Every structure is written in structure tokens, then in C-alpha cells.
Image (tube, rainbow, N blue to C red):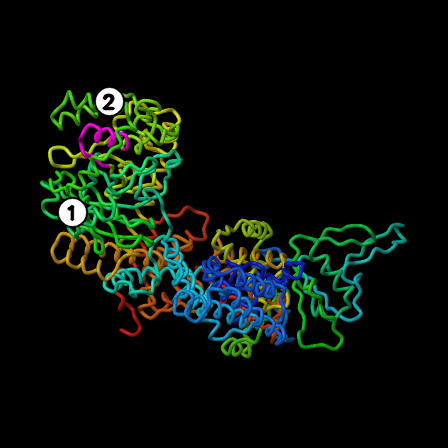
Amino acid sequence: MNETIAPEFLPLVDAVEAHLLGKRHAISLTLAAFFAGGHVLLEDIPGVGKTTLAKTFAGVMGLDFGRIQFTGDLLPSDILGVSYFDQESGKFVLKKGAIFTQFLLADEINRSMPKTQSALLEAMEEHHVTIDGKSHDLKEPFFVIATQNPYEEVGTFALPHSQLDRFLCSFGIGYPDKEAERAVLLGGGRRAAAAVPLIDATAITAAMNAVQNVHLSPMLLDYLQSLITYTRDSGRFVYGLSTRGALAMTAMTRAWAHLHGRDYAIPDDVQAVAGEVCLHRLAFKEGVTTLARLRHELFSHVSADA
Amino acid sequence: MRFSLLWRSTDPSAKQPGRIAARLQGWSASRELFLLDLAYLAVITPLLLLVKAPMLLFLLLVLTLLLVGKKGSTATLMLVALTGLLAVFFSIYGAFNFAGLSRLKLFVELILYLLLLAVSLQRLTRTINFYLLISPVLLLALSLFFFDSIAMLGYVVFEVFVLLWLILAYRTRADALSSLRITGMLFALSLPWVVLLFFFFPRISFEHASYGFRGDDITRTGHDGTMRMDGAALLVPSERIVMEVGFLGAIPPEEQLYFRGSVLYRDKKDHWEPLPAYVRRAFAPKQRAQEGMYRTIEKVTAYKVSLYPTHKKWLYLLDLPLEAPEGATINADFETTLEKPIDEPQHYDAGSALVYRYGSRTERTVLAYALDVNRSAHPRSSAAAESIVAANPDPKQRLGALFRFFRDQNLTYSLRPEPLDLNRTADSFLFDKRKGYCVHFAGAFVTLSRLAGLPARVVTGYKADRKNSVNNYLAVKERDAHAWAEVYVNGHWQRVETTAAAAFVDDESAELLRRTGTLEDNSDRLTRLNLYLLYVKYQVETWVLQYSHFRQMRLLEKVKKDPAFAARLAAAFALLVLASAALFLWLRRPRCGNRLLCLLRPLLSRLQRSGFVREEGETLHTFFARYLAAHPGSALAEVDRLYHRQQYGSGKEDAVQFKKSIRAFLREKPSQGDPDAR
């Protein structure tokens, strides 16, 4: 994919890439999802750099980083926090959970109980948590990267369709290509300097606002709608794309356009993100649902600029 | 793609209660059957007009069975087949015997019924086979045996179009709109060929088998050979067309538009009659008017006539007919007749002299009949005539005096006159009632002339109204039926327009005439439009429905003789070719939903020609980028930038700059940077 990232965002991507060699598209997608104000679900086997991506990303963006390793015995209060009775002050004091951070890495989210999962997912959606009947706002910006291991089945609780829908997009990182792998083997990734913040909060807010204002022309909306309609009417998928899914596609398209220095979106932006937006939302009635198949199915049946 | 334009209930989520609705849904699901049924709908509609009641009931039964979704089990089919055979039997019961089968029409009708029966049975099984597929075409061909009107001509064109469309929809599985477009394109392409083939290969006409398009077959009345003097003769002026006339030149002035029907001599009190047969036999009717029958003729005009069936034997020709159409003859009184009554529309060419003088060769017996009058029945007219004769010994002056006297009686033109005393019609009309229409005027004047010693006769026919004309086309209506007098003065007959002597028109008649539009200038737009339609209909009948080998020969002859006409014909054909080509191209035009994309089209086809094909699902930007990677520095980069900014950006379109960039790209040499050329 031809990626000409706008100069203002280029250092960010470059900095993360220095730690995660050859994964430019994944990095760009993460950045776009962040600017679009959504959350990312990383679905891949262990050891391809999910955590590296998250950590470096948080560092480069200058965000507080928090991490929760999801296990079978993790409780909602471990994530959200508890209020306990402080004997010295004679008051109930809130002990904030790991979620009170700006950047949260929820590792192996499918290994915990549904109750715990939904505590996180609710917080992701609402941007605030309720503890003992008291509402607490989370820090802004609030960004979650959740990872799940697709091949592990024993002791996991698969996220239901409705919960998956809350992630803006989902993708894997995949194996590095031959050259990048060689560089990694030679220690390229480790040798990179520790991530330092390259962007400040004001710039982040400005970028987020700009994403909201990216222009969608009627022609582009036609294309988006044709794609969405295709997922619903073609009869090839178990479910069509939900309205939330359609909104996610639009938001990601806008963010991608802004990331590439345009204040208007073009079909290429849609094609760059549509697969990742749909991957965890759609399932083929027959056969496996892979990103490549999904992209081919959508783009070859709904043509752009026609 | 579904056939959604025509049938919308394909959405399975739409809940439609009721068995019939479910049936319809199932029907639309089976596309082949649906298309086939549409074809049946198109071809059977006209046939429903002619199938007899039992067959109609049978078809209704089949339709009901189809609608309630009765599965065609063997027992049902047997029952339906029996019912069908019964229906066929009852439909042609009475008309049927073995001699009757030699009548083509009955034979074809039987075939049609059997075909309908076979199709119904096959359709009930809900399986499509080859026979079922060709049956609409067979039904269409059979319907041509029964219908021969312009309406059916138009409908057949429509049917052919629909069948072609359905075949395309069936074969190509394209959606309704695009197959309609292709059908339109095929039609446009075929138009010049159809005209050309039609021109060179006229309709095949069997000598005796009369079927195919032949114009409306409607019985008309009006002039009927005698002239009735009682009031029931004419009730309301009828707008029905008796005949249509196409002049080769301009339409002659109104006072020359007398179409001659029959000539009457004998006053039978309540009606007038022609000469007895034995007197008429003295002069053998000729095909052409002979020298001596006329003295001078001028202004010979040529025209074509389409006469509707009258069930009488007169052909109406303008005074004075010189040549009878084929099969007809002209007699001494210039009556043109066929041997048999006219039961089919007649189309004939004729020539008449509009300015003429009769010859002096009139038989003595005929003159005797023209002088025969019952003096004792008309004492007052007789007295008046005698005084006129005394004052005007010269016959010519006497005729003038008679007309003046006639005019001075203050006669009233009335379509609803009081009945005359039939024992003395002339006296009763001239001196008592003084009201009547053309018949009474002509009858009374002829009687008066005879009383004054001038031989006279009544001529009946039509006097056309120029208001019923468009260009050189003239429609003659029943209301134009007319009677006038001819008086024998100085050795030749002379026409007298007796109705012109009317001093008044009574209110009722004036109202009646105005309502149907003769007296006043009726420029009512509808009437005018109707006239134009008649004109078009007439032209279609003359040049399409009646186009025969004979007409073709005449046309070719004219083309040979008249180069200007040939040029006009060629020009018209060229125009037709251009029009159909334009129609074809218009239908073929790429559908352009977006202006910028349209502008890009030449560029895209150029890219395609140079080997760059847009892949499936590829966006334009990716496509252009692919080209630019192979051809760095191409002007396509600018096209790409402008296209995306204008198509998807919020700014205003600037087509000029965009076009410029496209032209810049197109100016680049195709070989420039081409990987193959390097």
C-alpha cells in the first residue's frame, strides 16, 4: 500500500518503526485508530511484537502507560479499583485500578471471565467508570490496545459479537518480512533508543479535532454505503455490518485521510482501513474469514470511482 | 441482478399474508416462467378480443388454476384437457363442417384454439420446454390472420419489441433496464433494414386468402343510391368518415369538390329512383369516358381515394370522372360503379376534370325521363313555371329565372323539417312548408325545371368540406352527403347548386351544424388534431398497409422518371439512417453519473490501449500510481491530484483546469516511457 504519511506524523511512525521493524501499516493503523478516538484489538500469535507496539506507541505519544495481563481469576475490581475504609481518616478512599491511565494494554483479553471483560469494555465505551455508585472520569485521551490469542482455546472466553463491535478495528501484526527479520536477528529493534515523546497533548487534541472535520464527498459516501450495503445484502456474510461498524469505517477513513495529510477522504483511505474495520465484525458464511479474503471480497464486488 | 424493476416482491423479509400473495412471490422467484408469462400477456391480449366465449372461459379456468397454484397432476391435466377440447368444440360449433375448414379463417381459428389448449396444458405443468418458448411467436403469427387495422400494426411492433426484450432478458440475465436498452439499440439498428426490405419486398398477398393488415373493416352508410324525401332520411350530421382522398396536387377550391354518386330521374313521390335498367342498358358502360360524353375538359386533377365499405356499388369520384378505377365502369351519366357491392375498403386512383362541359349526346329516352313530371300533382309550381316559360323563351334565361324564383320563395335550410305532403312534394316544399335540406331543394328544383320544360335530374353524392383537410388530404364524412340538380340546357347538362337558394338556416339546424362544425369556422383544436390523426392514419394505410407489388412498381417507375423524387426518397432514407444511428448511439452512450469520471473516460481508454488495465477493485489513485511508477514524470500525476481533490475535496470544481491536465496527458507520446518500447 502506498503510504505517504503527512510530514507532521512521519516522525511518530518512524520512531515506532525503529522498534517494530517493517510493520509500518500496523503502526499507521494504530495511529489512525488513536486519532479517531477508538480502540484496537490486536489478534495474533504471541511473540510478534504486540506488546512492543503498544509500549513504544505509548512512549512516542507521551501517554501514561498501563498494562493489565488478563487471567482467569482477574476481577473487575482489579481493573477498575476499589474503595476501602481508611481508618486514619475515617473515610472511604478510592484505590484506583489499572484502568486509570491514558494508554492501556489489555493483554490476552479473552482469558478472563466475561464479567471482567465487560467491565473493561464498558469503560472503553463510556470513558468513565463507576465504583460504589460513584462515577469517575478516565483520563483523556483514553486508548486501549487489547490483544487476544486466536489459537488458544482452553481456558478462554471468546468475546461475544457485541463486545467485539466496540473495537474500532482489529488486525494482526504478522511475521516480519525477510529483510526486517534479518535486521531483528541482528538486534536492530533492541538497539533503537528508548521511545521519547514526540508529540504533546495540544497537538493530539488538534489532530483529533481535524480528523472529525475531514470532508466526505457524496461520491465517497456512495462508495462507503455501497460497501456497507454489500456486507448486508450479498448473502455472503453471517451478519451485515452494524451501524456502529459503519461509523467505525467512516471514522477510520477520516483518520487515515488526515494521517496522510488530506482534509478529504478518497477511496484509497477506505480501502486501507475497511478490511481491518470489518475483520472482527464480519464472518463469511462459508470458509475462513481472513483479512486478505475480506478485502478481495469487498473491493472486487464494490468498485470505487465508477 | 434481479428483475427488480418489474417485480418488486423479491425481498424475502417482506411478509405478505395470503396464499395468492405467496403464489405471486413464488412466481417471481422463477424468472424464466415470469418472463414467459410476460410474453404471453403481450401476445394473448389482442387474441382475447376474438376467441369465443367458451374458449375465454377455458382460459379463465387455466388462469385461476395457475393463481391458486394447483400443481398440474395427471388427473388435473386430463380434466383440463377435456375441458379445453369441449371449449374448442363449442367455440366452433355450428361454423364447423368439413367444407368450412377450407375457409382459411375458420381453419386458422381452430389451429389457434388447439395451440392455446396445448400451451395451457404445458404451462400448468410449470416446466419450460422448447415448445412453450416458441409458442408466443406462434400466437403472434396467428393473430396476424385476424387483425388488419392500424392499431394492430402498432401493437405488433410493440409485441415484437417486447418479445425481443424478454428474449434478451432471458438469455443475458441482465437487469430489466439494460436489456431494455439493448433491445432499443437492436431496434434502432434494424429500422433502416426494415424500411429497405419493406420497400423492395412488399407484403405477400394471396389471391383469395384475405388476411393481414388491410385497414379498418367497418361498414359505413350515407349515400345509398336513391333519395328519400321523407323526414327520416337525415337525423344528425354524422362525423363518420366515408372516404379519404389524397390529392397529388393542391386541394381544388370548395365549389369543385362534388363527388358524384348516383344520378336519379324518376320521382316516386317518397323517393327518387335512377333510370330503369332497360334504358340504362342502351349505353354500355365504359372504362374511360368517351369523347362526345364531354365537350371540353380542363384542370384534370389526379387523386387517390380510400373508400370504406358501403355495401353499395358506387365509387365516388369528383365531377367529372374521366377514367374508372380497375374493375369499375363509367356510364353515360358518369356514374362510376363496381359490379358487386363494396364490402371491403376500396383504394383507388382516379383522375377528374374539374372544369368541364358535358357533351350533347344524350339519348332521347333519357331526355324523356328527364322531362317526366306529374303536372296535376303540382298545380302551383306548374302555374309558376308556366309564367316563367312565358317570360323567358330562351332556355338559358329560363334557367336563371327559375333559380331566382326558387330563391325568392324564402326557403329555409333545416335538418329537421316538417314532413312534406308526399303526393305533391314540390308544391308542399315551395309554397307551404318552405323548409327542408338538400334533398328537398334538389327534388323541388328538378320538378320545377321539368314543369318549365327543361329536362332535369337529381345527382346525389358528397360535397366535401375543405375544413376537413390537411395539406393535400381530405376526409369526406357522412354529413357531407349531398344532392344537387343537373339541368339540360342548350344541348348539355349543367350543374345547379340548389341548396344555395336557401334564404335562411333555422336555429336548430344551425346549432346542430355548429356543434359538429361546418357552418362556422370550427378551429377547435381537438377537431384539428383529430384531422391530423386521420391524415396520418390515411398515409399509413396508403403507404404501409396497402403497399403492394403494384404500388411498388408504380413507385419504382416514378423514381425512374423523376430524378428529383428519387433524390427526395434517397434523402429521406438517409435521414432515417441518420436518425436510427443517432438513436442507436444515444442508447449506447455510456451512462455517466459523474462529470469528472466522464471527462476521464478518454484518458482511461488511452491507458487501456497502451496496456494498462485497471484491476478488479483497484481505485483510480492506485491505478494511476501504478502507471506513474512505470512512467515517472507523466502528466498523469497532475490529473490524479486534480481528480481526487475535485472529486472528494470540499473545494469547488474547476473543470477547465482538469480538462487541461487531461489534454496534457493525452498529448504525451504513447510510447514515452512505455516499458515495452524501451
* Magenta span dominant secondary structure: helix
Reading the image, the residue beneath label 1 is B322
Specify whether B561 is left or right of B63.
Answer: left
The answer to whether residue A153 of the structure is visible from this angle is: yes
Left/right placement of residue A242 relative to residue B475 reads: right
Q: Tag 2, which chain?
A: B
Secondary structure beneath label 2? helix
Q: In the depicted view, which residue is nearer to us: B112 or A242?
A: B112
Residue B84 image point, x, y percent:
55, 69
Left or right placement of residue A26 versus residue B163 in this view: right
Q: CA distance from mark 1 to mark 2?
A: 40 Å
Say which of B74 and A41 sits in front: B74
Label 1 SS: strand
Label of residue B383 in the image: 2
Q: Measuring from the top left, give residue A27's x and y in whole percent.
A: 56, 65
Circle 1 packing at 10 Å, graded few (<14), some (14-19), many (20+), is many
What is the magenta range?
B443-457
Please say whether residue B451 is one of the residues in the magenta stretch.
Answer: yes
At horizontal 13% and vertical 52% (from top left) the residue drawn is B564
Q: Amino acid at mark 2?
A: Ala
Q: Residue at left 18%, top 34%? A: B455
